[in-house]
Each structure stands twice: as structure tokens, then as C-alpha cells.
Image (cartoon, grey):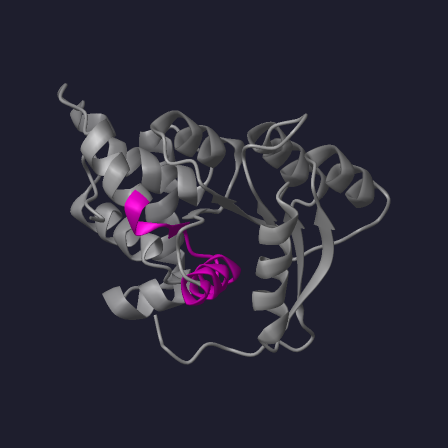
């Protein structure tokens, strides 16, 4: 990704769901110090955030922890995706165990960032998901690869082609479909078709889920 990140006008509207007030305030400060981002809501529970969204609060990106009091972040992600289908959801959490990672991606999260990451990494991942890419923390990608590499043979009908793997690999690096088309010297239509075929073979419905499933099956190596 380019070191020169875009400045958004109008600003990207961000909702932050995090039960630790100090961390919530520090993330808000990091985001609002950078031109092009505006925190339009900060909540300590998923219930409060959903109530505000149902009341008309809109966001371009929702940043959510998973370990929340009351409704879990994973359950909340599903509801957020229903209420704000055009919004991007990025997990920002301390949890790195396999069950939560896959549950969050299957629930519809567009990315997964570990809290120990730097402020600059947070901004980069926000830009990745805004550009339509899949944002996976390097720690998470490595953990998925090591923990979930499948040992049983994959049926030929469900094995990804070399081109389908290339497209998912580039998607995982944050490239948009247009950028992938330019990189591989194919049309955007072809890129979309490769992604659709990958979805069918991997039995998933979203790009983040496709990437995580491809890693689990040993088709991709993002370590």
C-alpha cells in the first residue's frame, strides 16, 4: 500500500464500539487527528450502538471490539450488517483465538485488527477496507495459516485455480478489483468472475470469508 494515504472529503464517518473508555478515547483521538475521519458515535455496549443505528445514526465504518458486556461483538456484527449493509465493519480487539477470528469473519466483518497494532496500521487497515479490500492483521493471517491448514485432500472440483488464488492473494493485500485487473492485465469483469468462482468453491458469501477459508485450506499463504 502506498505510504501516501488519501484525505477524505467529506470525512469518513466512524462508529466505535469499545467498552474500555480510555482506549475508546485514544482511538477517537488518533482518528480525528487525521484529516478525513470523524467519529460520529462512541459506545460501550453493542446494544447502545444498535439503538443509535436504528434511530438513524449512519456510518461508513464501524470499529468494534468482540468482548463486550451484554451482546457480543460477533452477534452485533450480524445485526450491523443487516442495518447498515453498505458500511464496512472492522474488528478491533485483543482476541486472537481461532474460534473468534473465524466467527467474526463469517458474521460479515471486513477485517480483523489486533489492538496491539500501531495507530498507523489502524489507518492503513481502514483505508484497505474502504477501498474494498480485506484487512487481516499479520498476526491473524499467520495464525490462521498455522492452525487451520487442512490435511485432508481437497476435491479437484473445489480446488482453486492458479488465477483464482492470485486474485484472492491480491485482495488480501488490500488491492481493489480495478487494481487487481491492472496487476494481472485482465478485465474487471474477469476479476469479478474469479472471485465468484472462489465463493462457489469455498462455500462462502464474502471476500473476507473467502480469504480466511482459502488460508484454512492451505490455498493461500499470507505469513
> Furthest residue to the front?
22
The residue that appears at 51% across and 44% down in the rendered structure is 91
* Residue 129 visible in the snapshot: yes
What's the magenta region?
A: 119-139
Residue 2 image offset from top left, x and y in percent: 35, 76
Q: Quadrant of residue 144?
A: top left
Comparing 174 with 145, the one in front is 145
Farthest right residue? 55
Q: Position of residue 39 (x, y in %)?
A: 69, 61
Image location (x, y in percent) of residue 193: 37, 48
Does residue 197 appear in the picture of this structure? no
| Nearer the observer, 222 or 94 | 94
Tell me the quadrant of the picture where the N terminus can be found. bottom left
Whether 78 is among the magenta residues is no
Determine which quarter of the picture holds residue 215.
top left
Determine the main secondary structure of the stretch shown in magenta: helix
For residue 114, side relative to residue 40 (left or right): left
Total residue callouts: 0
* Residue nearer the viewer, 32 or 163: 32
Q: Measured along the vertical axis of the image, is residue 105 above or below residue 9?
A: above
Q: Position of residue 139 (x, y in %)?
A: 29, 46
Occupied quadrant, residue 133: bottom left
Residue at 19%, 38% (x, y): give it: 219
Residue 58 left/right relative to 135: right
Amino acid at each position: 500500500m502506498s505510504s501516501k494515504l488519501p484525505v477524505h472529503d467529506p470525512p469518513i464517518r466512524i462508529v466505535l464500539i469499545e467498552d474500555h473508555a480510555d482506549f475508546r478515547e485514544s482511538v477517537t483521538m488518533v482518528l480525528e487527528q487525521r484529516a478525513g475521519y470523524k467519529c460520529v458515535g462512541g459506545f460501550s455496549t453493542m446494544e447502545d450502538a444498535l439503538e443509535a443505528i436504528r434511530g438513524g445514526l449512519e456510518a461508513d465504518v464501524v470499529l468494534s471490539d468482540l468482548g463486550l458486556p451484554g451482546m457480543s461483538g460477533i452477534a452485533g456484527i450480524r445485526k450491523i450488517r443487516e442495518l447498515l449493509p453498505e458500511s464496512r465493519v472492522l474488528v478491533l480487539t485483543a482476541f486472537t483465538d481461532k474460534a473468534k477470528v473465524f466467527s467474526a469473519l463469517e458474521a460479515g466483518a471486513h477485517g480483523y485488527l489486533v489492538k496491539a497494532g500501531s495507530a498507523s496500521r489502524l489507518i492503513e487497515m481502514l483505508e484497505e477496507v474502504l477501498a474494498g479490500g480485506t484487512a487481516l492483521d499479520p498476526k491473524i493471517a499467520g495464525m490462521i495459516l498455522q492452525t487451520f491448514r487442512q490435511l485432508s485432500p481437497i476435491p479437484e472440483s473445489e480446488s482453486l485455480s492458479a488465477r483464482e488464488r492470485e486474485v484472492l492473494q491480491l485482495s488480501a493485500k488490500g488491492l481493489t478489483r480495478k487494481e487487481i485487473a491492472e496487476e494481472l492485465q485482465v478485465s474487471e469483469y474477469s476479476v469479478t468472475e474469479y472471485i465468484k468462482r472462489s465463493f462457489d468453491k469455498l462455500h462462502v458469501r464474502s471476500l473476507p470469508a473467502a480469504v480466511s477459508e482459502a488460508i484454512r485450506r492451505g490455498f493461500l499463504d499470507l505469513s
